[in-house]
């Protein structure tokens, strides 16, 4: 499921919610390409230390982490559907 988030400058991002197939197959390259250097470094270190077992756990968590980071950076739901999904997850009031 995809939602739409936008910021005050008018930039719109459409992150997915739930399991991340891209993280499963491409690992730390996903946050790297999304411009999320903090999580790219964390995922790379975790993958190396756990022989890529951490990657299996992170594919369940990363999309939610990414959306929460966007919300903290000032993005907000661009439509009612996105607002409803975020409320259902408990990420916005």
Image (tube, rainbow, N blue to C red):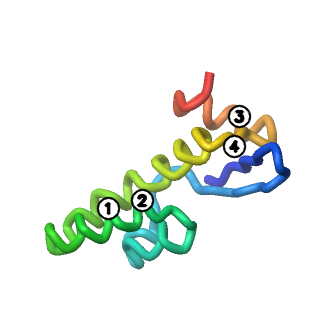
Instruction: State the image quarter where residue 83 is shown.
Output: top right
**Residue 13, how many percent across, how many down?**
71, 57
Q: CA distance from mark 2 to mark 4?
A: 18 Å
Q: Which residue is mark 4?
A: 75
Q: Residues within 10 Å of mark 1 (few under 14, many from 20)?
A: few
Query: Please, which residue is most extreme toward the top here?
Result: 93
- Marks 4 and 1, the one that precedes in the sequence: 1
**Residue 43, how many percent across, how many down?**
32, 65
Q: Nearer the viewer, mark 1 or mark 3?
A: 1
Q: Which residue is mark 2?
A: 38
Q: Which residue is mark 1?
A: 42
- Marks 2 and 3, the one that precedes in the sequence: 2
Looking at the image, residue 9 lies above or below residue 81: below
**CB-based contact (under 8 Å), mark 2 and mark 3:** no
Tag on residue 83? 3
Q: Residues within 10 Å of mark 2 (few under 14, many from 20)?
A: few
Instruction: State the image quarter where residue 27 is shown.
Output: bottom left
């Amino acid at each position: 499921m995809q939602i739409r988030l936008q910021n005050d400058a008018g930039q719109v991002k459409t992150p997915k919610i739930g399991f991340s197939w891209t993280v499963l197959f491409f690992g730390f390259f996903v946050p790297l390409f999304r411009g999320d250097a903090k999580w790219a470094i964390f995922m790379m270190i975790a993958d190396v230390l756990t022989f890529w077992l951490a990657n299996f756990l992170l594919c369940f968590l990363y999309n939610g982490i990414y959306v929460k980071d966007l919300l903290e950076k000032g993005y907000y739901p661009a439509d009612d559907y996105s607002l409803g999904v975020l409320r259902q997850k408990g990420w916005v009031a």
